[in-house]
Structures are given as C-alpha cells and as structure tokens.
Amino acid sequence: MVIDNVRNGGLICSRCGKNSMQTDDETGEFFCRKCGYVISDKVEDSGPEWRSFSKEGGADPTRTGAPSSLAMHDMGLATVINPVNRDSTGRPLSSAMKSTIERLRIWDSRSQAHKSEDRNLRQALNELGRIKDKLAVSSGVVEKAAYIYRKAMEKNLVRGRSISALIAASMYAACRNTDTPRTIKDVATVANIKRKDIARCYRLLHYELDLKMPVIDPIQCISRISSKIGLSEKVKRDASEILRITREQKESAGKDPMGLAAAALYMACVKNGDSVTQRDIAEAANVTEVTIRNRYKGLKTS
C-alpha cells in the first residue's frame, strides 16, 4: 500500500526538489515518485503487535491478552497469581516459597477490594452478569449498563440505596439507550425486584445523569413477540406496515410500544386468518388482553 506524503507534511525530495514523497508500507521504502530516489528502506510499523514469537510464527494474538471491560470491577487489568504452586519450569515450590506466595495471594485479593466502593462495585457487577445471562442481551448493552452504574457511583447516588435495584435500573437504561427491546417488567422479573423500585432508581439515574433516551420503536418488538408464538413472516410484515402507518399519522405517541406491537400483530393475524387468540399474544408480549383490545380499537380507527 503506497501512501502519498504530500498531504501529510509536504516533504521535498533532496535530489530533484519536487514535493512528491511517498511511503510503501509493504516494502518499507520511503521514496520520490518523480525521480525514484529512495531515502529510506525501513519504516517502523506503528500498528499493534500480533506476533506470538512461537516456532511456527504467524498472527496469533494471544500475547495481547484479554480486552479491558467496564463490566469487570478492575476492568480486567488486575494481577493474577497462579494458584498452582509450581515455578516456570514446572517444579514444585519449596515450603518457604509456598508460604510467601500464599501471603502474596492474600494481599493481592485484599488490595483489589479494600474500599467499600470497590466491594460495592464488585457486588453490583456480579449481579449485572447474572441479569445479563437471564435477559440474553449483547455485551455492548452490558458495557453501557456498567458505564451508567460507574457514573452513578461517581455522583454518590449509590449510598443508601439498594445495589440490586440500581444495577437493574442501569441495565434497563442501557436497554433503552441501545434500542434493545426489553421492558422494565422483564428486568424486574429476572432481577427479582419490585417494578416500582427499579422505576424509582431509573428516574433518579435519568434526572441526575441527564440521560438522553430515544423513543422505543414498537416495530422492534414485533420479532420478539412473534418468535414466542411462532407467527409467519407474512404476519410480521403486515404488522410492521400497520405500525408504520400509525407512526406516520402520529397515533402511537405516548402509548406503550409493547402493547402497540401486540395489537398490530393481532390485527395482522385477523387479516391473514390465523387462529391466534388475544391471550396468546398478551402472554408473549407480557401485557394484558384489555391493553390489546384498547390498542386494537385505536389501530382500526387510524
């Protein structure tokens, strides 16, 4: 790959005086494209080092280690002392060295959580990992939730409040921020916390951290509901079209997106002749049948 250095500094050739220097990353040559004068044949690579220094060579990235993560209380940068009492050659350690290494392990574990804030963060992120597994969300959502909780700790919002409720509210805020279709009721169910407690902590985070939350698109909820009751692709497309028309007419403002999606799916099922009851869709969407009937009447008139 040849890079033109005229834009990056405007270097001039010392032989012909032209402003036409180039760099070839493959051969490592720094030369003039007019007269061909080579100034240097070695270029330092400023990219990451991927070599493993093994006999086979290659591009093995194992030496770079695991990436840092906000979802770990130490961001993945802590020291790890091997629990196996052997040296680098595989021989067992002496009794004196064993006691020394054991003391190092104890002080290493103490140093990682010696303050109450560190212990709080470790407990909260452990709870976050448990919620993540039950909600089946991506790692990006978890990183966002951990970021929100760390910001809440910086503003001292954790003191005097439930760690479980605050980390659950952070997860719900991360789902809202990343357009992940998870309701507050879903988070409350998997976290085993009352919905009103999570809602209270969410309002606190929204106000104190000045979070900018996008409006949830009910079309994103269609796939989640239909996959639970096995609806056809034709029904999903018709429901998406119904919601699109409703949004253009501004009839969906201020209404629960999950209830709207459930009502649109029921309307699409009626249109296509599928024998799906309101109760089936209500259980899949985690809403009541009354909500579906009310939203269905609104969609019919729009």
Image: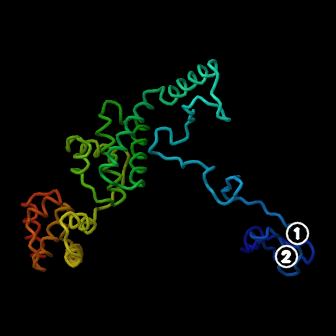
- Do the CB atoms of the residues marked 2 and 1 lie less than 8 Å apart? yes
User: In the orientation shown, which residue stands out farthest toward the front?
Assistant: 91
Which of 134/191 is in front? 134
Q: Residue placed at 21% from the left, 72% from the top? A: 250
Numbered label attached to residue 32: 2
Task: Residue 184: give x, y in percent of width and height.
Answer: 24, 51
The residue at the point 9 percent across, 76 percent down is 270
The reply, left or right, for residue 44 in relation to residue 122 is right
Residue 158 higher or lower than 172, as above or below: above
| Relative vertical location of residue 30 with respect to residue 52 in this rendering, above or below | below
In the rendered view of the protein, which quadrant contains the N terminus? bottom right
Q: Position of residue 83 (x, y in %)?
A: 54, 31
Dot 1 surroundings within 10 Å: few (below 14), some, or many (20 or more)?
some
- Circle 1 is placed at which residue position? 39
Comparing 31 with 282, the one in front is 282
Q: Tell me which numbered mark, 2 or 1, is placed earlier along the sequence.
A: 2
SS type, badge 2: strand
Q: Spatial distance from mark 2 to mark 1, Cα to Cα?
A: 8 Å
x then y, percent, for residue 153? 41, 37
Instruction: Give the position of the C terminus as an image quadrant.
Output: bottom left
Query: Which of the 4 image quarters holds residue 191?
Result: top left
SS for dot 1? strand
Query: Which residue corresponds to the image point at 13% horizontal and 80% vertical from the top-left?
Result: 272
Query: Label 2 is placed on what type of residue?
Result: Cys
